[in-house]
Amino acid sequence: MLIPEFSNTYAALGASFSTALEPTPVPSPELVKVNDELAKLLGFEPADLASEKGVNMLAGNESFEGMAPLAAVYAGHQFGQFNPQLGDGRAILLGEVVTSDKARFDVQLKGAGQTPYSRGGDGRAPLGPVLREYLVSEAMHALGVPSTRSLAAVTTGELVYREEPLHGAVLTRVASSHIRIGTFQYFAAKGMRDELKQMADYVIQRHYPEAAHKAQPYVELLIGVAKNQASLIAKWQQLGFIHGVMNTDNVLLSGETIDYGPCAFLDVFNPEQVFSSIDRGGRYAYQNQPSIAHWNIMNFAQTLLPLIDEDTEKAVESAQQVVDQFQGHYQTAYQEGMNRKLGLASDCVAGAALSDSFLVLLAEGQCDFTLAFRRLSEIFHETLSGSGGASAAGGDSVSALFEFPASFANWLQEWKQVLREPGCASTNPTEIFKANPVYTPRNHLVEKAILEGYQGNYQVFEDLLTRVTNPTMFNKQDAEYARAPKREEVVRQTFCGT
Ligand code: AMP
Ligand code: MG
């Protein structure tokens, strides 16, 4: 069996950072899915992972050689309330794998049993949320959004009890690391300065190595995290992705998206959209995501103060400066991406007014977010080359699925005018198709995959996965995966993966 060498630098940090423990075995694991491409990247042989021994490993029944499993401790602001003690309540980090090009990845089993941080929870995960996380995380990766990934999913042969008994499952999650803002908050709140420094140095070494050589390494760390977060949230906004639980324990310092609980992609564009059943106040609505990220970064900055300067006033001043730049970073990343979506060069200043007014029209017209932008890419080509728009990218047109209503006539005129101005249109004609994918894991499709999955049929899951991991090339035969949900299919609420 081909198993990459495990390395355990997180475990080596010491007992203040985690609790060593093995996954709790399950009665009869069965394979749902192995991610062949990711398996190979990490140095596994996919067929080995799919073998009986491999499936036992993925379920936590057998250990991978060289692993030192653990549950990490962290804290976090949940819906604005500080909880000083959280931690991996149902996830167990097996260890790290280093790829041939020296990238280090955590390999973690989610749903692997209780830990000291389970707080009364069962440590398990139902199959539905595991399938959802698999689909959405792999879709995000394919869409070019930094994200944790899914190496495998197995069922456990055990029921988990939520509102109803459900089949249990374990997801193998892969991430650049699982260190969160909440990890820093845990040590900061306890006044554990030595551990805080150890963690900060570890994160610098693992994710922001250039910061180590700067005069103010911890300020540099803050800058790096803030920039990554700004660019991440900009990508979410550009794709109509609503995370749903932007608590500080769900913010990774690596800049990857984590925690696909009640997340969802928008169908109809509505800036106030909330899907999560637990987000009653709409804290994490689509339009609030950038300001929540800013607030989260402020909380991260707070944890770093004792490391930045012994003089608190000086530390606050340095940190505040960085925090204040968040909105600028975000705005730049957002507008660059929106310009790309409109087929405009990144320095085309007309882009801001055009993208803002386009979104207003989308909301007023209750238009489908993904299809509207996609249709725009086709019109871009029709306008500039006079040829059949979609065929320019080698695909079919979505015009049968979406056409702009009359209310867009003026806007489309203005936009075409800007496109014809010298230097304004993007010079890379396929770029606009890449920026405007046609397939996202829409809620109603994910729900269908989950319902079928609970019946032991994973074909819908597989078919959807194929589309969302090749999100930009449209084929008319696949219209079922691209179209907006029918009225009776619309999913209005999503539930946490607990
Ligand atoms: P989340 O909302 O998924 O970010 O989870 C918040 C906290 O609850 C984390 O510390 C999780 O590990 C913990 N948690 C979530 N579900 C369970 C479960 N079924 N059993 C134990 N702990 C859980
Ligand atoms: Mg979480």
Image (tube, rainbow, N blue to C red):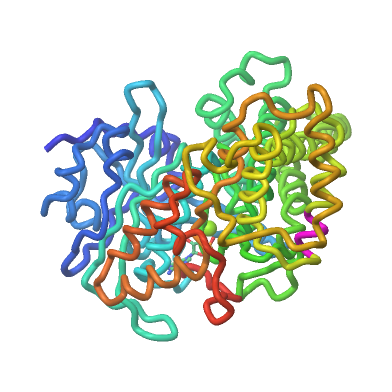
Q: Nearer the viewer, residue 248 or 167?
A: 167
Residue 406 image offset from top left, x and y in percent: 79, 62
Place residue 168 in its image quadrant: bottom left
Residue at (35% x, 36% y) in the render: 96
Asked if residue 383 lies left or right of residue 347, the reply is left
Q: Which residues lie in the magenta part? A: 359-363
> Which quadrant would the N terminus be assigned to in this image?
top left
**Is residue 135 in view?**
yes
Query: Which one is in front, 314 or 471?
Result: 471
110 shown above or below 457? above
In the rendered image, residue 331, in percent from the top left (x then y), is placed at 80, 39
What's the residue at 50%, 53% (across, down)?
439
Q: Nearer the viewer, residue 179 or 456?
A: 456
**Residue 73 point in image, percent of width and height:** 50, 51
Q: Residue at x 30, y 52 (%)?
A: 152
**Observer-nearest of 496 and 209:** 496
Q: Position of residue 435 (x, y in %)?
A: 61, 40
Residue 252 sits in quarter: top right
Query: Does 6 sit above or below residue 150?
Result: above
The answer to whether residue 81 shows anywhere in this view is no
Residue projecting furthest to the bottom:
164
Give the quarter of the image for residue 65.
Answer: top left
Q: 407 above or below 342?
A: below
